Amino acid sequence: MQFSATQIAGLINGKVEGDPEVAVDSFGKIEEARPGQLAFLANPKYEDHLYTTRASIILLNDHLALKGKVQATLIRVPDAYLAFAALLSKYQEMVKQHLTGIQEPSYISTTAMLGEHVFIGAFAYIGEDVKIGNHTKVYPQVYIGDGVNIGEDSVILPGAKIYSGCVIGKQVTIHAGCVIGSDGFGFAPQTDGSFKKIPQMGNVVVEDGVEIGANTTIDRATIGSTLIRAGAKLDNLIQIAHNVEVGNHTVIAAQAGVSGSTKLGKNVMVGGQVGIVGHLQIADGSRINAQSGVTKSLKTPNSAVTGSPAYDYTSALRSQVAVRHLPDFEKRIQELERKLAQLLAVNS
């Protein structure tokens, strides 16, 4: 399937510079692309490749001034990264499989309600009173427990498990191996040193437009709901504990963990391997650097923290600079002490 520069520019409202009829049939990185491929330039550190790339078409930002001759046809857009993402999405829609129907063997309860043009893959299990919206795809080996409600145009990929009573919104993607609605980690210590399990009676509610990466686990609430708000994006291998709330359009990178009853606000960015203790409030727009340990609530919106325990990002960078200079500081202090001793000796 080939597309000309004119056709591509029309899809993303771009302006063509060069041959409008040159065509591409695939995508490539700007430093590796071959003729017949489309690449993009958004990060300035890759600009040198613009003048040597073999790509036929390149997306780049409107404001970028050329420093030399470019062989490829250019398509200028306000934001090359966003335009490239939009183009990939459109291409994916064109080429992806439009699966419908029910593969065998699979188990679907007689009380389950399936919408129009639903796909159920082989070896899937659909429990009692489940509701699945129109155009939703449930891939092979998925387990959907009793009373689960899944909205329209959602995709549940192979091997995902959704426990009973959970609610999944529209246009949600749940990747392979996810577990949604497993018991929260609730155990009460006893006088004899043992632990008594606290029943986890709530559920998980995943709102519209959420994407959850492979092998991520989201625990059901003790009472009420663990909430993943609309537009949130969760990477692979994340642990979300019981009664946590993840705010709208918040993003969490791989191997992060959020402990019970913590509330993350809107547009929060959580780096990889971050640990957040329970019962905290994380303000809207907070940015938590990778491998940070958050032990206190972040109350100031749009602030950034790093370290373990995490604290203000700018102050942390200054501290790191100071630590690197500690050996020099020690030598200077020793020299000052030596000179001070000499002065005292002369004056005594």
Image: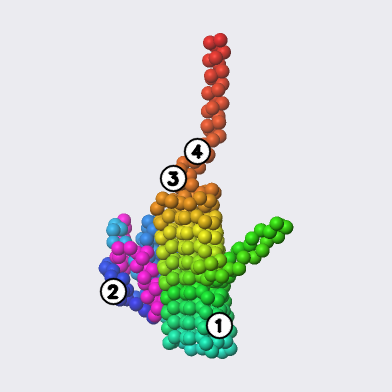
Callout 2 amino acid: Gly
Q: Is residue 283 above or below residue 30?
A: above
**Which mark is first along the chain, 4 or 1?**
1
Cα distance in 3D space between marks 3 and 4 = 13 Å
Mark 4 lies on residue: 322
User: Sequence-wise, which precedes: disc 1 or disc 2?
Assistant: 2
Residue at (47, 82) in percent of width and height: 132
| Residue type, mark 3 in image | Thr
As for residue 42 lying within the magenta part, the answer is no
Observer able to see residue 196: yes
Residue at far right of view: 192
Per the image, label 1 sits on a secondary structure element best described as loop
Q: Report the Cα–Cα distance between label 1 and label 3.
A: 51 Å
Query: CA–CA distance between discs 1 and 4?
Result: 60 Å
Closest to the camera, between mark 3 and mark 4, is 3
Left or right, 197 with respect to 298, comes to right
Question: Which mark is on residue 10?
Answer: 2
Q: Amino acid at mark 4?
A: Ala
Of the numbered discs in the image, which one, if any, rests on residue 127? Answer: 1
